[in-house]
Image: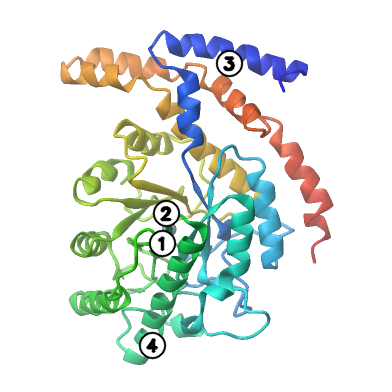
Amino acid sequence: MFDTPGEKRISRGYAYAKEAYATLGVDTDTVLKKLAAIPVSLHCWQGDDVGGFENLSAASGGGIQATGNYPGKAGTPDELRQDAEKALSLIPGRHRFNIHAMYAETGGKKVERDALEPGHFQNWVDWAKDKGLGIDFNPTCFGHPKADDGFTLAHYDAGIRNFWIDHCIACRKIGAAIGKALGVPCVTNLWIPDGYKDVPVDRYRSREILQGALDVVFEEEIDPACNLDAVESKLFGIGSESCVVGSHEFYMGYALTRNKLLCLDAGHFHPTEVISDKISSVLLFLDEILLHVSRGVRWDSDHVVTLTDELRAIAEEIVRNDFLNRVHIGLDFFDASINRIAAWVIGTRSMIKALMIALLEPTAHLRELEQAANYTARLALLEELKTLPFGAVWDYYCLSSNVPPAGAWMHDVMDYEKQVLANRG
Ligand code: RNT
Ligand code: ZN
């Protein structure tokens, strides 16, 4: 390593950056050690446009939709794992993989969602073990005939409601089995699409029904060493513009009173509202939270995560407050208009880059300035930090993690596209 002219350039760049950060009292080597220990949960559904492998219907339903038709989408679990492996080989660090119930492998047999068992996810567990990955899990309460009218756990019909309750109970057991098998807890996140296209008359009753259903889902205690339950709120979806039953206030209250993880999805609030500002509030009252880091453009569009101000702010909130053990960082985006492996790589590398930049900050000094009400110096320093050579630190991190640095990984993706993706039907 560090023999080729390109690698030598990265090595020289790092030496310069190390000195530059040292003048601020920041040790870049320590930063990179910390960074390497932060897992990011890559969502499997970027790889197949939220399709799953149950052959039910092409569309995801539930008001979420991947747009685009870039060729080469994964059509089988093996293809999806192969694609994920490719993406992971271009991402520094050790991470997690987030799957949905609809990615079950039932050996060609039709298994209803309320009858799913840990065995249907054995291939995922074996794969994760082999690759040193953790796994997170999700019930799939959409893209199914029993969810076609947009209601699941909050359905007025007890038959349909119970079907989804049973599905969610099955999923918690699957999560627990996964966590047990891998020796690290699985975060099982519950999101349901339930909501009204037009103005409802009785919001309270719908929310009361949801509360009751959730209490049944969560009745059985599960060892938190195996499974952690999270609940995800939303403001609106396609077809649920007027009222989403599982709103922020609903799940905030639910998580607080039932000791659950709250999942904050970056696209699930008013367009000018940001989740970075919520982390410090909710963590005053909750032990742990889950993030669905996403990028909404004008609405909950789930664009690929990029290094935006908000992404940086999210990372800063986690790092500055030492919340790394209380915030589970998951990604949630799906873009079918570009190479799907590149989408994973861009989004995950951006997340890690944001965490690195936050770790490179001389936070203690900034805090002192703030406490002394020296807002002038605080602003001046925050601005100066923006042009420090973090790109050189990033390239060095990639290279020393055996991952291509900036500008190099796209060649791998293009080769893979020619050799693998182009041959898919
Ligand atoms: C939908 C939620 C949810 C899904 C995934 C597929 O608005 O964000 O998290 O994106 O479960
Ligand atoms: Zn989400």
Q: Amino acid at mark 2?
A: Trp
Badge 4 or badge 1: first in the primary sequence: 4
Q: Which mark is residue 226?
A: 1
The type of residue carrying mark 1 is Cys
Q: Nearer the viewer, mark 4 or mark 1?
A: 1
Q: Are marks 2 and 1 in contact (CB under 8 Å)?
A: no
Residue 122, position as x, y percentages in the image: 59, 69
- Pointer 1 local density, CA inside 10 Å: few below 14, some 14–19, many at least 20: many
When the figure is inspected, residue 350 is found, relative to residue 104, above or below; the finding is: above
Q: Earlier in the sequence, mark 2 or mark 3?
A: 3
Residue 247's place in the image compared with 303, above or below, is: below
Question: Alpha carbon of mark 4 to alpha carbon of mark 1: how far?
Answer: 29 Å
What's the residue type where badge 4 is placed?
A: Ile
- Circle 2 sits on which residue? 299
Residue of label 3: 14
Image location of residue 121, percent across then percent down: 57, 70
Q: Residue at x 24, y 74 (%)?
A: 211
Q: Nearer the viewer, mark 2 or mark 1?
A: 1
Mark 3 / mark 1, whichever is N-terminal? 3
Return the disc, 2 or 1, that comes first in the chain's sequence.
Answer: 1
Q: Is residue 109 above or below residue 364?
A: below
- Ligand 1 position by quadrant: bottom left
Q: Which residue is mark 4?
A: 160
On the image, which quarter does residue 166 sit in? bottom left
Identify the image's colour scheme: rainbow, by chain, secondary structure or one colour.
Answer: rainbow
- Using the image as rendered, state which of residue 169 and residue 270 is in the foreground: 169
